[in-house]
Image (cartoon, rainbow, N blue to C red):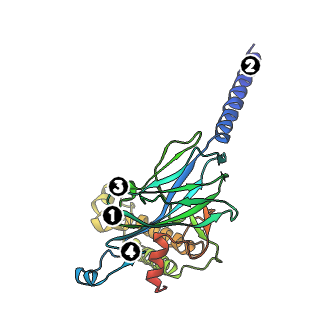
Amino acid sequence: MNDLVVSLGSLIVGVVATVWVSAYYFRRSLTKSLTPYVQFSSKPFQGISADVRKALQVTYAGVQVEALYEVQFVIANTGDKAIRDLIEPLSLAVPENSTLLDASILHAEPAELKTTLKIPEDRRSISIDFPLLNKGDFFVLKVLLNGAAKLEELKFSILVDELPRQLPAERLEFDAIASSKKREMIFPLLGVGLVVVLFGLALFKVIYDAWTGLPSTDGGIMAFLSRVTIGALAVWLAPVPALFLTLIGAMMSAAALFDGSFPPRKKKFVLPENLARTPFRAMVREGSGES
């Protein structure tokens, strides 16, 4: 009887597990998702003194630019199903306090991906049509605005089966982009990592030298407690930050070999070198004196 119960129980558990796993992967195979990622945004005129800004006259296509704002998006099919047969194309509304200067598609992956960008006469929106966007396909959209805009005001919309009408823009992780150029070592990151490792090892040396002077338990627990000082507690606790600094420094140094990411991960988007810009890359290049 017990063997029968065990057999039936095992059979039921196996069937339930099989059905659950099958349903999970079936649902995954039916997901459709289009995600606009914010690759970077900048305000080139920000920080310029009022006197210099007053004397600096900038025009674009005959329009005087008061507050230039640029934002670059990576728009990708992040689902498992292809996106096709758009009822209404993907569109981006221009905020009320901004004026559209220009918009362009800088790159598409794969290269044969067809996209059509249109700007209406009122220049209050941008529309992008495409016949097919397979899983993993993406394109890069750059927008220039005259007027300070907030990222949350840049709203995408689309009308197609199985997708929401509104597509909020998401921040792109700093290490999600890779350059098609051969990987090079990031020397500023390597230098910072080695300095952090040096601090961790120096702290270990201080701990080692002070360890012999710590109280022991040879005379009993009460004698031991009576000899415990704040300095002794500090020495006992110091290995924690020392180990933390050493590990973080080692990871930073290793990340310098893997385009700023450790452990190394497969990049979501591979872009030409001139487009593979992120806030992290900009900070590294400014620190290294590259243009």
User: Which numbered disc, 2 or 4, marks the residue closer to the eye?
Assistant: 2
Q: At 65% from the left edge and 39% from the top edge, which residue is drawn?
A: 30
Q: Residue furthest front?
A: 121
Q: Earlier in the sequence, mark 2 or mark 4?
A: 2
How packed mark 3 is, by other alpha carbons closer than 10 Å (few <14, some 14-19, many 20 or more), is few
* One can see residue 89 in this view: yes
**Pointer 2 residue:** 8
Q: Earlier in the sequence, mark 3 or mark 1?
A: 3
The x and y percentages for residue 15 are 72, 26
Q: Earlier in the sequence, mark 2 or mark 1?
A: 2
Q: Earlier in the sequence, mark 4 or mark 1?
A: 4
Amino acid type assigned to the residue bearing label 4 in the image: Ala
Amino acid type assigned to the residue bearing label 1 in the image: Leu
Query: For numbered disc 4, what is the local secondary structure?
Result: helix
Disc marking residue 221? 3
Q: Indicate whether 135 appears above or below 176.
A: above
